[in-house]
Image (spheres, rainbow, N blue to C red):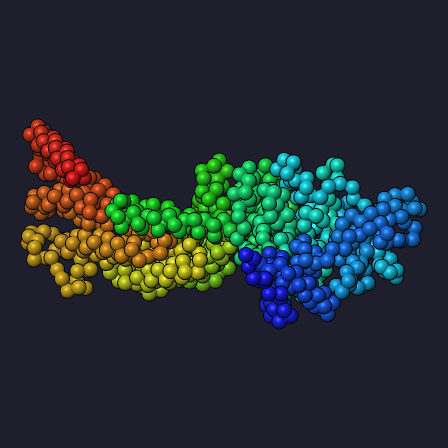
Amino acid sequence: MPGPKARPPTSADVEELLAEIIRHHEATGVLPSASEIAAMAGGDSNLASRLAEAAYRYLSISASLDTGAIDFNSLQTPLPDAPSRPVSADTLPVFEGFRTIERIGTGGMGEIYKLQDLTLDRTVAAKVVRRQAGGPRTTAAEFLREARSLALFSDPRIVRIFECRTETEPAVIIMEFVEGFELGRLAPSLEFRQRARIMREVCDAVEHAHTLGIQHRDLKPANIMLDAALSPKILDFGLSDSNAWRGHLRGTPTYIAPEQLDPSQPIDGRTDVYALGVIFYELLCGAVPYSGSTTEVLAAVEAGQPRLPIEVDARVPDPLQAIALKAMERQPADRYQSARDMTRDLERYLNGLPVTARPTQYAATLAARVAPHLDQVAEWLRLKLVHPHEANRISGAYRALQVRDDDWIVASRALTPSQIALYLGAFFLFAGALFYFVAHRVYGAVDGLAGPVVILGLPFVGLNVAGRWLYRREHQAVAVAFYLGGLSLLPLFLLIGLHETGWWVAAPDDARQLFSGDVVSNRQMQITAAVACAWSVWLALRTRTSALSTVSAATIFLLGVSVLADFGLRDWLDSNRFDLLALHLAPIVAVYGCAAWWLERSGRPWFAAPAFVAAGIMLVLVLDLWAIDGKLLHYAGLSMRHLQPADVENPMLLDMLTSLALCGMIFYAIAAAFERRGPTAMSAAVLMLFTIAPFSILEPLAYLSRSAVYHQRFDWLYLGLAVGIALVSYRRQRKSFYYAGLINSGIALILIADRNRWFDKPAWAIAIVAVGISALVAGFILDAEHRRKSRS
């Protein structure tokens, strides 16, 4: 029994769905695809056909009213159910002086025909205004603009123009006929070096166009032909323009740049660079980065997360992949800033040199793929599959990948012959400058400014100029070494120059000066340190290297010390008031810490890590200075003097050693707190504090044993504490505690034998051997017990 007949679609049905299509077009700038329209019609083919017809009529009317709308004829996605208009021989246009042979293609603003020049007997191509019923018509002015654009060129890689006829109907450009194959069709049969060589020529030709003020804005493989010699020829400048605010929403979706989808963003030469990147992407792996309907492609272009070419074709060389992705960066500022920059990287690859491209997508892709691994490590730790120290080590390695430095920075850390020579050169420059300063200021062997200017000043300027030149030409590692060499000359040159000019020279008998005599005044040190600090910080921020960041941290310390010279630094040192020195150095710890935290938060981990380490070093220095003479205990209102014998010469000895041991406990507590809550850039400083802490706890007892001013029981207390710290390492899995325990246990055994004169007593050696065997047996028993529990 036949089912009920489907209800024929009414005008209301079509109008309701057409309103939805119009809303979609206004929101995205494109019509839904044929499959999307069929889905909207609910599988009703009759309704889908009527709807497609209505959509086509709407598009024609809309395009004719607004010539700034997206050029749908160049979108390579046919309109749904648009009536086809095949061109027959009878409808071929006729041009005076030429015989029209055939239509050979469609460009961004017109149709292309193959002609025979009856006068010169040559084959040429003619581009005429597209005749689309109801559609947008190219104006004579726009057509003439393309002709003038092409006429500017004398580049063999760009199609030549012979004649332009705008007074005829239709308007026509007569141009060179290119015999060959489209780039996309020939690419799969080429070697990767051939593909790179072709792309280099295309980029160089586009750069030529840009220097003439012309931007193509519709680059795609179909507009690039290859002749028999694999030489490229760029076609179709129909959408070319130089106005930054004209040309949005025009072009081919697959090759359109993200900024072309946003009329609020300007368009410049980097838009063509993006298209070059997409072309190269397709050239490398045989697939476009984004596929699907026009709407899906444009959404993917805006998102800017293509698959890696090597995921499509595993043979794609990594340097070429990096070049393509660099050109395809979503943000114009992250791309190659010109087609010439892309050409240079392609030349580097062809010459066997490393390329400079490091796409931001690498970091984003790596971070996205690392995140699940970090979650897995956390899960392993929750299930007790790994120890906390193992989880920290694994997580630390993954986090290091997330904040990995640029490739050239990683490569510069390798001990290659060039790196060794570069940093040896920087070191010898500093050593030579220091000797020159001593000869000038201490021994008076050099007079006047001429010598310092020639020996120190001119090399400083030359090294920095050379460093800037090298850095801009992608020799970053060499540039950093040059910057370091120049920076090592700057402070000593300034000190000599200030003295020779008589600026801020102190009187020889001024007791407020840190250095006696007239070698260097406090003010000269402060000015020199401030200039060196500012210069090193600027270089560190420019180069993003830890080497210059570390130097910056050191110059900040020198600046702080030079400022303290005005507050009585010399008196504190002469009177052994180390507690006052510690109190005045404490603000530097805060400066380092706050600066490091800000640098880490602002995305500068290469600078934050040295600052955190400097803060840790200053913290150790301040607390240890504070512990001298037991001042750390005294400020807390405590003392250990009642525990020491009356015949001990230094009544503060026990207070000082207790304070030093207490400092070790503070170091451990701070490290443990920041290990849990601190940022990744703090990891090196935390490791340093963990390493120092056990030695700081044990060394005061080692001193007591060596001095032999206390009872022998302190020797045994020292040994017991050393062994205890080695055992405690199990609880927190701290190897620094284990090594500190072993080293100090050995020192304690030697001190006990020396105090008791047991070196010639075999019983002492036998006792130690017996303890060692007992420890081995205990270890075996503990292991067996652990295995038994594991099996049960």
> Residue 108, position in %: x, y?
73, 56
Residue at 66% over, 58% down = 80
The answer to which of 631 and 115 lies nearer the viewer is: 115
Q: Is residue 152 visible?
A: no
The residue lying furthest to the front in this view is: 1
193 lies above or below 378: above
664 lies above or below 37: above
The mark tally for this picture is 0
Q: Is residue 645 visible?
A: yes
663 lies above or below 18: above
Residue at 70% over, 50% down = 206
Snapshot quadrant of residue 261: bottom right
For residue 321, side relative to residue 108 (left or right): left
Snapshot quadrant of residue 197: top right
The answer to which of 266 and 120 lies nearer the viewer is: 120
The answer to which of 763 and 264 lies nearer the viewer is: 264
For residue 711, side relative to residue 146 (left or right): left
Q: Where's the N terminus, which quadrant?
A: bottom right
The residue lying furthest to the bottom in this view is: 12
Q: Where's the C terminus, which quadrant?
A: top left
> Residue 533, position in %: x, y?
45, 58
Residue at 27% over, 63% down = 583
> Residue 762, position in %: x, y?
8, 28
> Residue 306, position in %: x, y?
54, 50
Residue at 62% over, 71% down = 12
